[in-house]
Amino acid sequence: MRIIATLMAMFAASPALAASGPFFSLQNTNFVVGIAFILFIGVLIYFKVPGMLTGLLDKRATDIQAELNEARKLREEAQSVLASYERKQKEVTEHAGRIVEQAKQEAQLAADQAKEDLKDSIARRLLAAEDQIKSAENAALREVRNKAISVAIGAASDVIAKNMTATDGNQRIDESIAQVEAKLH
C-alpha cells in the first residue's frame, strides 16, 4: 500500500508532463530522470531500506518507551522518597515540639524549685539571724550584769572602806582566816 501511494505521488507531481517533445525518448531528460528515480526507489526496496528504516524507527520508539518507563519509575520512586522525607520532617517537627514543651516544663519546675529553695534559704538565714540577735542580747545582758556586779562590788567596797575602821578590818580578816582553816581541816 505504501509503495502504491509513493508511485502515485511520484507520477502525479512529475515534471515530465511539462516537457516538450516525445516523452518516452532517451533524448528527453525528464524521462531519464524519471527512470533513474524509479530505479533508485526499486534499489531501495530491493535492499529493504524501508524495512531497515522502519526497524530503526521501531527500535528508537522502544528505546524512547523504555526511557519513559524508567523515568516514570524514577518519578514514582522520587515521589515516595519525597513523601518519606516529608513524613520524617513532620515527625522531627513534632519531636522538636515535644522536646521544647518538655524543656519549658522542666524550666518551670526548676524555677519553682529555685523559689522554694530561696524561701528555705531565707527562712534559715532569718533563723540564724534571730539566733545571733538572741546570743548578742544574752552576751550584752551578761556584760551589763557583770558590769553592774562589778560596779556594785566597787560601790560596796567603797562604802565598807569608808565605814570600817582598822580594828574592824583586822577582826574580819581573823574571822575569815578561821573560817578557811575550819573548812580546810
Image: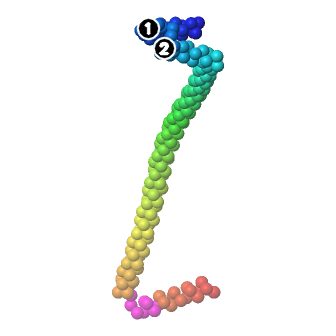
Instruction: Tell me residue 35's x, y (percent).
Output: 54, 13
Instruction: Tell me residue 169's x, y (percent).
Output: 43, 90
Instruction: Tell me residue 142's x, y (percent).
Output: 43, 70
Instruction: Tell me residue 168's x, y (percent).
Output: 43, 89
In-front residue for pair 99/32: 32
Residue beneath the point at 51% across and 87% down: 175
Residue 4 falls inside the magenta stretch? no
In-front residue for pair 35/64: 35
Quadrant of the rendered structure where residue 85 is?
Answer: top right
Q: Is residue 22 visible?
A: yes
Mark 2 highlights which residue? 27
Dot 2 crowding, Cα within 10 Å, few <14, some 14–19, many 20+:
few
- Our reading of the magenta stretch's main secondary structure is helix
Q: Amino acid at mark 1?
A: Gly
The relative height of residue 105 versus residue 21 in the rendered view (above or below) is below
Count of residue discs: 2
Quadrant of the rendered structure where residue 36 is?
Answer: top right
In 3D space, how far apart are the residues under numbered discs 2 and 1 (Cα atoms)? 9 Å
Mark 1 highlights which residue? 21
Dot 1 crowding, Cα within 10 Å, few <14, some 14–19, many 20+:
few
Q: Is the C-beta separation of discs 2 and 1 under 8 Å? A: yes
Residue beneath the point at 44% across and 11% down: 15
Q: Which residues are magenta?
A: 164-171
Left of 132 or right of it: where is 84?
right
The relative height of residue 153 versus residue 36 in the rendered view (above or below) is below
